[in-house]
């Protein structure tokens, strides 16, 4: 499928299969009221995410990527346009998504294991104690925090807290995952390991994923499509299908020629914008 | 400008009540309404049951007025303020001096520390009878009580301030060749200063409270004395009126302190 | 796997860098030495002068021993009960009220200044009012302590409830929580910090309240013992009572430290 430049509002080649979209942004834009007046964080954007698709959003700081995730999660309402999930407009908190935010909002009074467990404690999900325990331990292993289950967030480094947040989001296997720079603070080796795990889990559980990152390489490694944003006010510059074969070997795919070509092409789009980024 | 990560869902279209609250005058109006309503209920509610404890706002107001006119209000107010300020000044002076001394001579502090801690745990008001026996029933005993209360607080905060100086900083300056005196002047003192000021700020409240308590226990002057006196003769109107004076005084004091703090932090160029 | 823990805070600074283990015992010896010296000095002064207002440690010790054979326990119990009952009721009501009102933005905004105004009044000074209406026994003191504690806890919880990080609530909501679960799992635990902080502050005030009430009018209790001794110019009894009060104060402060350490483990874990 040829890459579509959505900013030109060209006819959406997938208009016919609209009903199948998991997530749809239809001209969704966001303006915030700030001290000096109004701030446009996101220019009206059109984006469709198919079920089980892995979409990566890349762009400089402050370009509205997080705003999009917030709107899909129902934490923000768009100032114009609309956001749809499973065909329904998102008007309240969207409980079908799991959201891993940039800020690791762990409950400081709970240990790592207890933080991870919390989604399983809620009424909407009846999980027996034993099952919950097993799954929590599984998650802890997955993110490599064995031995730290009983530590409080204040005792963990930033990267470790991020991993707890990741485990917390994944454990109840929501049908859609929203992730905002989840691996930013981690060292390169760990990052690759977790990327691998993420790929496996999301394929296995057939999750739809919207993944925000600064790291273009990360995006190309995992995504089915990469969306490149401009600096604030953010607008979509380019959407590129990533036609690398699946399943991808996270550790080796970066060294393939196809990867390099994609990286070069997208970096061209991105590099003009990077300098204009504002700090989030 | 940072972008807010998550914002809570905007409320439903704000109702009239919410819109009123949004304005400052609306809020003021709402508060006055609440207070006024409660007072009105107290005054005009029928039946002795609600004629709460043998008095009402109108009588209290009248009694207060009579005090203003015959000067007794000002005399007592002055007595309370005098005891408070004097005690505060003395307590601060001694507290800071001893605090600095102990800060410079930590071995000395360590030796005396358990005794200071023990005395600190004693509710200072318990010393009131002792001071009355020693100093008599005049203003001296109240000043002494306030002074001791303030002393302990200031001592602690001063010591905290000195203790909070980064040890590495002291060491590195020592390596550079600074003498003990220079370290004191250039690091310890400026570092401890904000803590001393914090201590002084906190102590005002305690000075106020303990002045009143001292006046309750035994005194022949002051607002606390008035409360005790009128309750002693079962004059509830008088008691309430004295309490009203207390409330006004407390609120005024808090306001003054807040304004002072703001002025001072602006003056020092910090927000 | 990277596994770095948080950096520890800078260790407290003293000019001499802190005591070593051997010096620790030396310090203790000095402390004991100072204590003995003070007692000896006191004894000497008591012997020398007619001991009118100094009494003597030896006499005080005798008095204490006599008391501890029987009579003292009812007084300690009285004061302790007044404190504990007042604390429990005040904390319970204060926290509930604070949580409920704190979560309502409307009530928060409107009532805030009124509550702040009330908070600034030294409530302990209202002791005579309660004694006037409720008499001599434990009730007025319990009420006094309850009210003092209530306001402290209410204010603390009120402030805390309004400051719960909304992001934390959003996180749990996204997982599918009900409003009740929001409260249970996020708001209430988050407020614990404030509540414990409030109880910490309230404990000494409870002691002051109970003691003051007893000094004003009572038939039993440590405060009563104190003022009774003072009224009879019984200096020995006065100092003895002060000593016991000091012990009680130390117990209170130790309890407060332990409680905080237990309930807020997660805060101190990194230290």
Image (spheres, coloured by chain):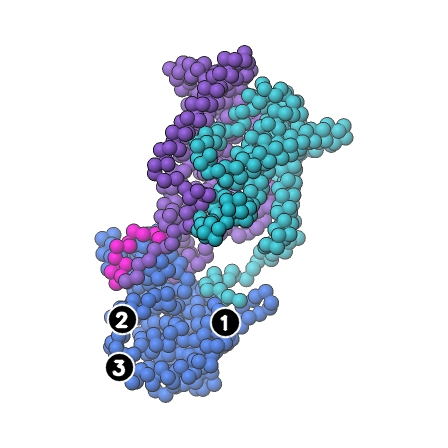
Chain colours: A blue, B cyan, C purple
Same chain under badges 3 and 1? The reply is yes
Residue B227 pos. (x, y %): 63, 27
Element assignment for label 2: helix
Element assignment for label 3: loop
Residue C266 visible, this angle: no
Element assignment for label 1: loop
Q: Residue at x 40, y 81 (%)?
A: A267
List the single residue furthest toward the top: C50
Residue A247 located within the stretch drawn in magenta = no
Same chain under badges 2 and 3? The reply is yes
Q: Could you tell me how far apart the alpha carbons at marks 2 and 3 are, in whole angstroms?
A: 15 Å
For the magenta stretch, what is the residue range? A140-156
Name the residue beneath numbered marker 1: A278
Q: Where is B4 relative to C136, above or below?
A: below
Q: Residue at x 61, y 33 (%)?
A: B90
Q: Residue at x 62, y 52 (%)?
A: B268
Q: Where is C145 relative to B4, above or below?
A: above
Which tag is nearer the camera, tag 3 or tag 1?
Answer: 1
Q: Nearer the viewer, residue C250 or A239?
A: C250
Q: Could you tell me how far apart the alpha carbons at marks 2 and 1 are, in whole angstroms?
A: 31 Å
Q: Residue at x 37, y 36 (%)?
A: C23
Residue C91 pos. (x, y %): 45, 37
Q: Earlier in the sequence, mark 3 or mark 1?
A: 3
Q: Quadrant of the N terminus of chain C?
A: bottom left
Neighbours of disc 1 within 10 Å: few (<14), some (14-19), many (20+) = some
Which tag is nearer the camera, tag 2 or tag 1?
Answer: 1
Name the residue beneath numbered marker 3: A245
Q: Chain of mark 1?
A: A
Name the residue beneath numbered marker 2: A196
Same chain under badges 2 and 1? The reply is yes
Q: Could you tell me how far apart the alpha carbons at marks 3 and 1 are, in whole angstroms?
A: 35 Å
């Amino acid at each position: 499928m040829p890459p579509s430049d959505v900013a030109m509002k060209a006819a959406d080649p997938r208009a016919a299969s609209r009903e199948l979209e998991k997530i749809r942004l239809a001209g969704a834009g966001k303006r915030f009221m700030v001290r000096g007046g109004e701030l446009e964080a996101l220019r009206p954007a059109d984006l469709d995410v198919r079920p089980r698709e892995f979409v990566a959003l890349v762009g400089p700081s402050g370009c509205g990527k997080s705003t999009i995730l917030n709107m899909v999660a129902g934490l923000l309402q768009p100032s114009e346009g609309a956001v749809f999930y499973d065909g329904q407009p998102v008007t309240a908190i969207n409980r079908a998504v799991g959201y891993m935010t940039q800020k690791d909002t762990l409950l400081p009074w709970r240990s790592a294991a207890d933080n991870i467990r919390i989604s399983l404690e809620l009424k909407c999900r009846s999980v027996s104690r034993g099952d919950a325990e097993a799954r929590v331990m599984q998650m802890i292993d997955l993110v490599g925090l064995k031995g730290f289950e009983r530590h409080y967030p204040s005792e963990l480094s930033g990267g470790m807290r991020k991993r707890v947040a990741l485990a917390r989001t994944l454990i109840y296997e929501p049908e859609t995952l929203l992730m905002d720079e989840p691996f930013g603070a981690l060292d390169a080796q760990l990052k690759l390991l977790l990327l691998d795990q993420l790929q496996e889990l999301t394929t296995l559980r057939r999750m739809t994923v919207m993944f925000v990152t600064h790291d273009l390489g990360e995006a190309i490694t995992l995504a089915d499509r990469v969306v490149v944003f401009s600096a604030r006010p953010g607008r979509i510059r380019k959407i590129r299908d990533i036609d690398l074969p699946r399943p991808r070997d996270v550790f080796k795919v970066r060294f393939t020629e196809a990867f390099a070509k994609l990286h070069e092409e997208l970096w061209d789009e991105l590099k003009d914008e990077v300098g204009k980024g504002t700090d989030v | 400008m940072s972008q807010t990560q998550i914002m809570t869902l905007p409320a439903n279209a704000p109702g009239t009540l919410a819109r009123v609250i949004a304005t400052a005058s609306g809020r003021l109006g709402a508060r006055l309404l609440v207070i006024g309503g409660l007072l009105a209920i107290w005054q005009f509610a029928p039946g002795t049951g609600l004629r709460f404890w043998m008095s009402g706002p109108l009588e209290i107001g009248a009694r207060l007025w009579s005090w203003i006119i015959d000067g007794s209000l000002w005399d007592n107010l002055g007595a309370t303020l005098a005891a408070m300020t004097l005690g505060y000044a003395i307590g601060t002076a001694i507290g800071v001096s001893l605090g600095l001394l102990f800060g410079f001579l930590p071995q000395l502090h360590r030796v005396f520390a358990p005794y200071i801690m023990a005395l600190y745990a004693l509710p200072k008001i318990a010393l009131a009878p002792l001071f009355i026996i020693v100093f008599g029933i005049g203003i001296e005993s109240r000043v002494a009580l306030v002074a001791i209360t303030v002393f302990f607080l200031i001592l602690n905060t001063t010591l905290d301030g000195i203790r909070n100086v980064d040890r590495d900083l002291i060491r590195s300056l020592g390596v550079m060749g600074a003498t003990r005196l220079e370290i004191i002047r250039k690091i310890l003192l400026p570092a401890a200063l904000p803590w001393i000021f914090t201590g002084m700020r906190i102590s005002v409240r305690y000075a106020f409270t303990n002045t009143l308590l001292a006046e309750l226990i035994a005194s022949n002057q002051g607002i606390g004395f008035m409360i005790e006196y009128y309750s002693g003769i079962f004059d509830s109107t008088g008691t309430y009126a004295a309490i009203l004076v207390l409330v006004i005084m407390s609120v005024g004091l808090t306001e003054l302190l807040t304004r002072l703090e703001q002025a001072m932090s602006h003056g020092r160029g910090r927000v | 796997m990277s596994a770095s823990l948080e950096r520890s805070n800078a260790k407290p600074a003293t000019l001499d860098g802190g005591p070593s283990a051997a010096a620790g015992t030396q310090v203790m010896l000095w402390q004991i030495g100072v204590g003995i010296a003070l007692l000896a000095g006191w004894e000497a002064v008591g012997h020398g002068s007619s001991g009118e207002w100094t009494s003597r440690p030896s006499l005080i010790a005798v008095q204490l021993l006599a008391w501890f054979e029987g009579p003292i326990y009812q007084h300690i119990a009285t004061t302790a009960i007044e404190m504990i009952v007042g604390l429990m009721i005040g904390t319970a009501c204060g926290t509930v009220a604070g949580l409920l009102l704190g979560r309502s933005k409307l009530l928060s905004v409107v009532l805030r200044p009124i509550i702040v105004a009330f908070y600034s009044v030294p409530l302990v000074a209202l002791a005579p009012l309660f004694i006037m209406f409720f008499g001599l026994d434990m009730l007025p003191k319990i009420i006094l302590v309850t009210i003092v504690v209530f306001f402290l806890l209410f204010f603390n919880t009120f402030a805390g409830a309004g400051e719960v990080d909304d992001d934390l609530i959003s996180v749990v909501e996204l997982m599918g929580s009900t409003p009740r679960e929001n409260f249970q799992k996020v708001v209430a635990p988050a407020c614990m910090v404030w509540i414990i902080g409030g109880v910490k502050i309230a404990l000494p005030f409870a002691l002051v309240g109970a003691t003051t009430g007893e000094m004003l009018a009572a038939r039993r209790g440590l405060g009563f013992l104190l003022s009774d001794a003072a009224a009879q110019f019984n200096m020995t009894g006065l100092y003895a009572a002060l000593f016991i009060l000091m012990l009680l104060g130390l117990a209170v402060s130790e309890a407060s430290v332990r409680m905080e350490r237990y309930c807020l483990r997660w805060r101190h874990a990194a230290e």
